[in-house]
Amino acid sequence: MVSKSRWKLLAMLALVLVVMVWYSISREDRYIELFYFPIPEKKEPCLQGEAESKASKLFGNYSRDQPIFLRLEDYFWVKTPSAYELPYGTKGSEDLLLRVLAITSSSIPKNIQSLRCRRCVVVGNGHRLRNSSLGDAINKYDVVIRLNNAPVAGYEGDVGSKTTMRLFYPESAHFDPKVENNPDTLLVLVAFKAMDFHWIETILSDKKRVRKGFWKQPPLIWDVNPKQIRILNPFFMEIAADKLLSLPMQQPRKIKQVMMGSQA
C-alpha cells in the first residue's frame, strides 16, 4: 500500500513540477532558499527557456503543450481518452468532470500571463515559517502558491498576505475561502478520486451534499465564487509519479481510488 509519506512526497513533487514547468522560475533553488534567507532587493535577470531546458533534461519527453488547468473545450469531444484513472488521469470520470468544468474556469490571470519573468514561491502549512518575519519577502514573488489549509490571517508577518493560488482537495478544504485568500486567488482542486469532482459540483451547484467516500468529511458549506475554481491537470501528477518517484501507473483497484488519509 502506498504510504502516507509517499503520497505527501508525491503531492509536493507535483507542486514543484507545476512551478518549474509552467511558471518558468528563473532559478528553481530560490523557493527553497526563501525559508532561510530574505529575497535580495535586486532581482537577477531571467533567462528565457532556462526552466524549459532543465525540465526537458529531467523528464525527457517534456512538452509545454499540456495546460496547467483542465479546460472545458478539451472534454466536449475527447479525441485521445486518458489512459489512467485519477489521480494520474481522468479515465472513467469524464462525464462528471465535464459538468464541473462547465461551471468553473481554466484561465490564467492576465497579470500573470503578461509577465516576462515569473518568480514563484510555495508556502506549506507547517511551522517552519513561524517567527521568521518573511512575510514581506514572500509578497515580493510574482506567484505565491499555498497548500491546503495553510493559514494566512493573523500570520501575515511570517507567511505574507499574497496568495495567487491555493492547491487543495476536499478533505483539506477546511479554510474560509474569503478570509484566508485574496479576492482574486485561484483555488486549484487536486483531484485524487472521482468523488472529489462530485463534491465540488455539489458545492458549486448547491446540490445535495455528499458525505461518504472521503477519509475525512469535507466542508458541506463552502462560500466560494465558481470562477475562482480551477482543476489541476492530472498530467502533472502522472509525470511526478512516473518520472520522479517511479511509482507504478497501473495499481490494484483498491489503491487507484485513494480514499484514505494517504493522499494528504
Image (spheres, grey):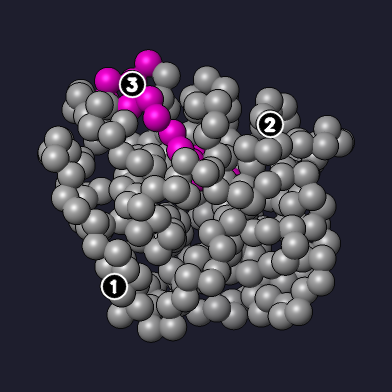
Q: Would you say residue 160 sits in the magenta stretch?
A: yes
Residue 163: x and y, percent? 43, 33
- Three-letter amino acid code at the position of disc 1: Lys
The residue lying at 20 percent from left, 42 percent from top is 34
Who is closer to the viewer here, 191 or 143?
A: 143
Give the residues drawn in magenta, as a range.
154-169
Query: In the rendering, which numbered label is found on residue 225?
Result: 2
Report the Cα–Cα distance between label 2 and label 1: 36 Å
Report the Cα–Cα distance between label 1 and label 3: 33 Å
Q: Secondary structure at mark 3?
A: helix
The residue lying at 33 percent from left, 21 percent from top is 156
Residue 103 falls in image quadrant? top right
Q: List the residue tagged with mark 1.
A: 54
Of circles 1 and 3, the one toward us is 1
- Three-letter amino acid code at the position of disc 2: Asn
- Three-letter amino acid code at the position of disc 3: Glu
Residue 177 visible in rendering:
yes
Residue 114: x and y, percent? 44, 48
Residue 154 vs residue 134: left or right?
A: right
Q: Earlier in the sequence, mark 1 or mark 3?
A: 1
Query: In the rendering, which numbered label is found on residue 156?
Result: 3
Q: Earlier in the sequence, mark 2 or mark 1?
A: 1
